[in-house]
Image (tube, helix red, strand yellow):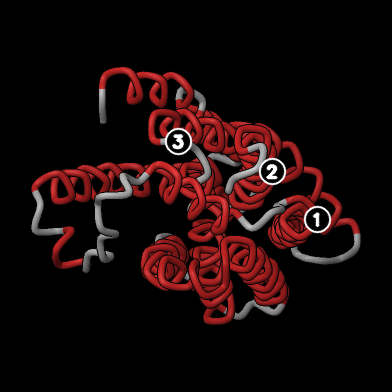
Protein backbone atom coordinates (compact mmCIF):
# COMPACT_ATOMS: atom_id res chain seq x y z
CA UNK A 1 0.00 0.00 0.00
CA UNK A 2 1.28 3.46 -0.91
CA UNK A 3 0.67 6.16 1.69
CA UNK A 4 0.40 9.79 0.56
CA UNK A 5 1.97 8.98 -2.77
CA UNK A 6 1.71 12.41 -4.36
CA UNK A 7 3.18 14.36 -1.44
CA UNK A 8 6.07 11.92 -1.08
CA UNK A 9 6.79 12.03 -4.80
CA UNK A 10 6.86 15.83 -4.74
CA UNK A 11 9.26 15.83 -1.78
CA UNK A 12 11.58 13.38 -3.52
CA UNK A 13 11.45 15.40 -6.74
CA UNK A 14 12.32 18.65 -4.95
CA UNK A 15 15.26 16.94 -3.27
CA UNK A 16 16.49 15.55 -6.57
CA UNK A 17 16.18 19.00 -8.15
CA UNK A 18 18.51 20.34 -5.44
CA UNK A 19 20.95 17.47 -6.00
CA UNK A 20 20.92 18.09 -9.75
CA UNK A 21 21.54 21.80 -9.19
CA UNK A 22 24.48 21.24 -6.83
CA UNK A 23 26.03 18.57 -9.05
CA UNK A 24 25.65 20.66 -12.18
CA UNK A 25 27.11 23.72 -10.45
CA UNK A 26 30.08 21.59 -9.43
CA UNK A 27 30.67 20.58 -13.05
CA UNK A 28 29.95 23.94 -14.69
CA UNK A 29 32.59 25.44 -12.42
CA UNK A 30 35.10 22.97 -13.92
CA UNK A 31 34.21 22.65 -17.60
CA UNK A 32 35.74 26.01 -18.59
CA UNK A 33 38.98 25.03 -16.82
CA UNK A 34 39.53 21.48 -18.10
CA UNK A 35 40.87 22.35 -21.54
CA UNK A 36 43.08 25.13 -20.19
CA UNK A 37 44.60 22.82 -17.58
CA UNK A 38 45.02 20.01 -20.12
CA UNK A 39 46.99 22.27 -22.46
CA UNK A 40 49.05 23.64 -19.58
CA UNK A 41 49.96 20.31 -17.97
CA UNK A 42 50.42 18.54 -21.31
CA UNK A 43 52.68 21.28 -22.60
CA UNK A 44 50.85 21.53 -25.94
CA UNK A 45 47.43 22.70 -27.07
CA UNK A 46 46.77 19.22 -28.48
CA UNK A 47 46.24 18.03 -24.90
CA UNK A 48 43.35 20.44 -24.39
CA UNK A 49 40.67 17.89 -25.23
CA UNK A 50 42.15 14.96 -23.31
CA UNK A 51 40.70 15.85 -19.87
CA UNK A 52 37.24 16.20 -21.41
CA UNK A 53 37.74 12.80 -23.07
CA UNK A 54 38.50 11.20 -19.69
CA UNK A 55 35.53 13.02 -18.19
CA UNK A 56 33.18 11.79 -20.93
CA UNK A 57 34.53 8.23 -20.82
CA UNK A 58 34.06 8.13 -17.06
CA UNK A 59 30.54 9.43 -17.47
CA UNK A 60 29.62 7.01 -20.25
CA UNK A 61 31.00 3.80 -18.79
CA UNK A 62 29.82 4.61 -15.26
CA UNK A 63 26.24 4.85 -16.51
CA UNK A 64 26.20 1.06 -16.94
CA UNK A 65 27.64 0.50 -13.48
CA UNK A 66 25.27 2.91 -11.78
CA UNK A 67 22.34 1.36 -13.61
CA UNK A 68 23.19 -2.07 -12.27
CA UNK A 69 24.00 -0.69 -8.80
CA UNK A 70 20.73 1.18 -8.35
CA UNK A 71 18.84 -1.89 -7.14
CA UNK A 72 21.34 -3.43 -4.68
CA UNK A 73 22.54 -0.05 -3.35
CA UNK A 74 19.21 1.73 -3.58
CA UNK A 75 18.73 5.10 -5.21
CA UNK A 76 20.01 6.95 -2.13
CA UNK A 77 23.12 4.79 -1.92
CA UNK A 78 23.89 5.19 -5.62
CA UNK A 79 23.55 8.97 -5.54
CA UNK A 80 25.56 9.26 -2.30
CA UNK A 81 28.39 7.20 -3.76
CA UNK A 82 28.33 9.32 -6.91
CA UNK A 83 28.59 12.57 -4.94
CA UNK A 84 31.51 11.20 -2.94
CA UNK A 85 33.24 10.15 -6.16
CA UNK A 86 32.87 13.72 -7.37
CA UNK A 87 34.41 15.04 -4.17
CA UNK A 88 37.38 12.70 -4.57
CA UNK A 89 37.77 13.61 -8.24
CA UNK A 90 37.71 17.36 -7.64
CA UNK A 91 40.23 17.14 -4.79
CA UNK A 92 42.50 14.87 -6.85
CA UNK A 93 42.39 17.33 -9.73
CA UNK A 94 43.12 20.31 -7.48
CA UNK A 95 46.15 18.55 -6.02
CA UNK A 96 47.32 17.54 -9.50
CA UNK A 97 47.10 21.13 -10.78
CA UNK A 98 49.19 22.44 -7.91
CA UNK A 99 51.80 19.72 -8.39
CA UNK A 100 51.73 20.02 -12.22
CA UNK A 101 50.88 16.31 -12.59
CA UNK A 102 48.96 15.46 -15.76
CA UNK A 103 47.92 11.85 -15.17
CA UNK A 104 46.45 12.40 -11.68
CA UNK A 105 44.51 15.30 -13.19
CA UNK A 106 43.10 12.99 -15.86
CA UNK A 107 42.15 10.49 -13.14
CA UNK A 108 40.34 13.25 -11.28
CA UNK A 109 38.52 14.25 -14.47
CA UNK A 110 37.33 10.67 -14.93
CA UNK A 111 36.08 10.55 -11.33
CA UNK A 112 34.12 13.76 -11.83
CA UNK A 113 32.58 12.20 -14.96
CA UNK A 114 31.64 9.12 -12.94
CA UNK A 115 30.01 11.38 -10.36
CA UNK A 116 27.93 13.45 -12.77
CA UNK A 117 26.78 10.23 -14.43
CA UNK A 118 25.16 9.26 -11.14
CA UNK A 119 23.72 12.74 -10.59
CA UNK A 120 22.14 12.76 -14.04
CA UNK A 121 20.32 9.51 -13.25
CA UNK A 122 18.43 11.42 -10.57
CA UNK A 123 15.91 12.55 -13.19
CA UNK A 124 14.92 8.92 -13.78
CA UNK A 125 14.64 8.34 -10.04
CA UNK A 126 12.08 11.16 -10.05
CA UNK A 127 10.26 9.52 -12.95
CA UNK A 128 9.83 6.18 -11.21
CA UNK A 129 8.05 7.70 -8.20
CA UNK A 130 5.37 9.24 -10.45
CA UNK A 131 2.55 7.78 -12.47
CA UNK A 132 3.36 7.19 -16.14
CA UNK A 133 1.35 10.23 -17.28
CA UNK A 134 3.46 12.54 -15.08
CA UNK A 135 6.93 11.16 -15.66
CA UNK A 136 8.12 13.48 -18.41
CA UNK A 137 7.19 16.50 -16.30
CA UNK A 138 8.94 14.98 -13.28
CA UNK A 139 12.09 14.50 -15.34
CA UNK A 140 11.94 18.04 -16.67
CA UNK A 141 11.47 19.43 -13.16
CA UNK A 142 14.67 17.77 -11.96
CA UNK A 143 16.53 18.90 -15.07
CA UNK A 144 15.63 22.50 -14.15
CA UNK A 145 18.18 22.05 -11.38
CA UNK A 146 20.80 22.02 -14.11
CA UNK A 147 19.74 25.54 -15.08
CA UNK A 148 20.14 26.72 -11.50
CA UNK A 149 23.55 25.06 -11.36
CA UNK A 150 24.58 26.69 -14.63
CA UNK A 151 23.79 30.08 -13.13
CA UNK A 152 25.46 29.44 -9.78
CA UNK A 153 28.57 27.58 -10.98
CA UNK A 154 30.19 30.48 -12.87
CA UNK A 155 29.52 32.83 -9.96
CA UNK A 156 31.99 30.89 -7.82
CA UNK A 157 34.61 30.03 -10.46
CA UNK A 158 36.15 33.49 -10.67
CA UNK A 159 36.20 34.26 -6.93
CA UNK A 160 37.62 30.83 -6.11
CA UNK A 161 40.35 31.29 -8.72
CA UNK A 162 41.32 34.57 -7.09
CA UNK A 163 41.14 33.02 -3.62
CA UNK A 164 43.47 30.19 -4.65
CA UNK A 165 45.95 32.65 -6.15
CA UNK A 166 45.74 34.74 -2.97
CA UNK A 167 47.02 31.88 -0.82
CA UNK A 168 49.81 30.97 -3.21
CA UNK A 169 48.08 28.16 -5.12
CA UNK A 170 47.55 27.86 -8.85
CA UNK A 171 44.48 29.93 -9.73
CA UNK A 172 43.16 27.08 -11.88
CA UNK A 173 42.85 24.86 -8.79
CA UNK A 174 40.37 27.21 -7.11
CA UNK A 175 37.24 26.08 -8.99
CA UNK A 176 38.12 22.46 -8.21
CA UNK A 177 38.07 23.23 -4.49
CA UNK A 178 34.65 24.82 -4.92
CA UNK A 179 33.48 21.79 -6.89
CA UNK A 180 34.52 19.45 -4.07
CA UNK A 181 32.46 21.53 -1.64
CA UNK A 182 29.41 21.41 -3.90
CA UNK A 183 29.62 17.63 -4.22
CA UNK A 184 29.83 17.37 -0.42
CA UNK A 185 26.73 19.58 -0.16
CA UNK A 186 24.93 17.27 -2.62
CA UNK A 187 25.86 14.24 -0.51
CA UNK A 188 24.47 15.94 2.61
CA UNK A 189 21.19 16.79 0.86
CA UNK A 190 20.84 13.18 -0.31
CA UNK A 191 21.56 11.79 3.15
CA UNK A 192 19.21 14.12 5.01
CA UNK A 193 16.28 14.61 2.65
CA UNK A 194 16.04 11.80 0.09
CA UNK A 195 13.63 9.76 2.19
CA UNK A 196 11.91 7.34 1.91
CA UNK A 197 14.03 5.23 -0.42
CA UNK A 198 12.67 6.04 -3.92
CA UNK A 199 13.19 2.45 -5.06
CA UNK A 200 10.52 1.21 -2.67
CA UNK A 201 8.03 3.90 -3.65
CA UNK A 202 8.66 3.16 -7.32
CA UNK A 203 8.01 -0.53 -6.78
CA UNK A 204 4.82 0.23 -4.87
CA UNK A 205 3.55 2.47 -7.67
CA UNK A 206 4.42 -0.14 -10.28
CA UNK A 207 2.58 -2.80 -8.28
CA UNK A 208 -0.48 -0.61 -7.75
CA UNK A 209 -0.80 0.28 -11.44
CA UNK A 210 -0.09 -3.19 -12.88
CA UNK A 211 -3.01 -5.23 -14.13
CA UNK A 212 -3.36 -8.15 -11.64
CA UNK A 213 -4.08 -10.49 -14.54
CA UNK A 214 -0.85 -9.48 -16.26
CA UNK A 215 2.23 -11.45 -15.19
CA UNK A 216 5.25 -9.45 -14.07
CA UNK A 217 7.68 -9.22 -16.96
CA UNK A 218 11.40 -9.87 -16.68
CA UNK A 219 13.91 -7.11 -17.22
CA UNK A 220 15.08 -6.92 -20.83
CA UNK A 221 18.74 -7.29 -21.71
CA UNK A 222 20.65 -4.44 -23.36
CA UNK A 223 20.77 -6.46 -26.59
CA UNK A 224 16.98 -6.77 -26.58
CA UNK A 225 16.55 -3.05 -25.96
CA UNK A 226 18.87 -2.12 -28.82
CA UNK A 227 17.13 -4.47 -31.21
CA UNK A 228 14.31 -1.91 -31.31
CA UNK A 229 14.44 1.08 -33.66
CA UNK A 230 13.46 3.79 -31.09
CA UNK A 231 16.43 2.87 -28.88
CA UNK A 232 18.79 2.96 -31.86
CA UNK A 233 17.50 6.35 -33.05
CA UNK A 234 17.62 7.85 -29.55
CA UNK A 235 21.21 6.69 -29.01
CA UNK A 236 22.34 7.95 -32.42
CA UNK A 237 20.73 11.34 -31.79
CA UNK A 238 22.39 11.57 -28.38
CA UNK A 239 25.80 10.62 -29.79
CA UNK A 240 25.62 13.22 -32.58
CA UNK A 241 24.46 15.93 -30.19
CA UNK A 242 27.21 15.12 -27.70
CA UNK A 243 29.86 15.15 -30.43
CA UNK A 244 29.03 18.71 -31.49
CA UNK A 245 28.45 19.97 -27.97
CA UNK A 246 31.63 18.59 -26.40
CA UNK A 247 33.79 19.77 -29.28
CA UNK A 248 32.58 23.36 -28.87
CA UNK A 249 32.70 23.28 -25.08
CA UNK A 250 36.32 22.11 -25.10
CA UNK A 251 37.72 24.50 -27.68
CA UNK A 252 35.86 27.68 -26.64
CA UNK A 253 37.57 28.17 -23.23
CA UNK A 254 41.01 27.58 -24.76
CA UNK A 255 40.42 30.16 -27.50
CA UNK A 256 39.11 32.67 -24.98
CA UNK A 257 42.12 32.09 -22.73
CA UNK A 258 44.35 32.70 -25.73
CA UNK A 259 42.67 36.09 -26.09
CA UNK A 260 43.39 36.89 -22.42
CA UNK A 261 39.85 36.56 -21.10
CA UNK A 262 39.51 35.96 -17.36
CA UNK A 263 38.28 32.73 -15.76
CA UNK A 264 35.08 34.55 -14.74
CA UNK A 265 34.33 35.63 -18.31
CA UNK A 266 35.04 32.17 -19.72
CA UNK A 267 32.78 30.63 -17.07
CA UNK A 268 29.89 32.93 -17.93
CA UNK A 269 30.14 32.03 -21.63
CA UNK A 270 29.96 28.32 -20.81
CA UNK A 271 27.13 29.11 -18.41
CA UNK A 272 25.09 30.50 -21.29
CA UNK A 273 25.52 27.22 -23.12
CA UNK A 274 24.49 25.11 -20.12
CA UNK A 275 21.45 27.31 -19.44
CA UNK A 276 20.39 26.63 -23.02
CA UNK A 277 20.78 22.91 -22.37
CA UNK A 278 18.42 22.85 -19.40
CA UNK A 279 16.25 25.97 -19.28
CA UNK A 280 13.62 24.69 -21.72
CA UNK A 281 13.28 21.25 -20.12
CA UNK A 282 9.93 22.10 -18.50
CA UNK A 283 8.43 22.96 -21.88
CA UNK A 284 9.83 19.84 -23.54
CA UNK A 285 8.59 17.69 -20.64
CA UNK A 286 5.06 19.04 -20.97
CA UNK A 287 5.11 18.52 -24.73
CA UNK A 288 6.37 14.96 -24.29
CA UNK A 289 3.51 14.15 -21.92
CA UNK A 290 0.97 15.81 -24.23
CA UNK A 291 2.19 14.74 -27.69
CA UNK A 292 4.18 11.61 -26.87
CA UNK A 293 7.89 10.93 -26.78
Label 3 to label 2, Cα distance in Å?
A: 18 Å
Q: First in sequence: mark 1 or mark 2?
A: 2
Q: Earlier in the sequence, mark 1 or mark 3?
A: 3
Pointer 1: residues within 10 angstroms few (<14), some, or many (20+)? few
* Residue on which disc 3 sits: 131
Residue at point 69% right, 38% down?
11
**Residue on which the image places disc 2:** 15
Check the image and report above or below for 254 versus 278: below
Q: State which mark lies toward you, 1 or 3.
A: 3
Q: Which mark is residue 192?
A: 1
Pick the residue in front: 95 or 56: 56
Residue 263 visible in the displayed image: no
Identify the secondary structure beneath mark 2: helix
Structural distance between the alpha carbons of marks 1 and 2? 10 Å
Q: Position of residue 51 (x, y in %)?
A: 47, 66
**Of helix, strand and loop, which one carries label 1?**
helix
**Residue beneath the point at 41% across and 48% down:** 251
For the C terminus, give its image quadrant.
top left
- Number of marks in the image? 3
Amino acid sequence: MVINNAATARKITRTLLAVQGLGQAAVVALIPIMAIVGAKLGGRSQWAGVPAMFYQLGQAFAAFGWGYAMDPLGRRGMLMLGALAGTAGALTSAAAINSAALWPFLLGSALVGIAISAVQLSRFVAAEVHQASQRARAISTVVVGGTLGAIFGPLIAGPMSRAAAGVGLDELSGPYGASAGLFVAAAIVIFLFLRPEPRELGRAIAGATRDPAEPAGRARSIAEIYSERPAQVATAAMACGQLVMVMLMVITPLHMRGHNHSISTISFVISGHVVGMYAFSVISGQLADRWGR
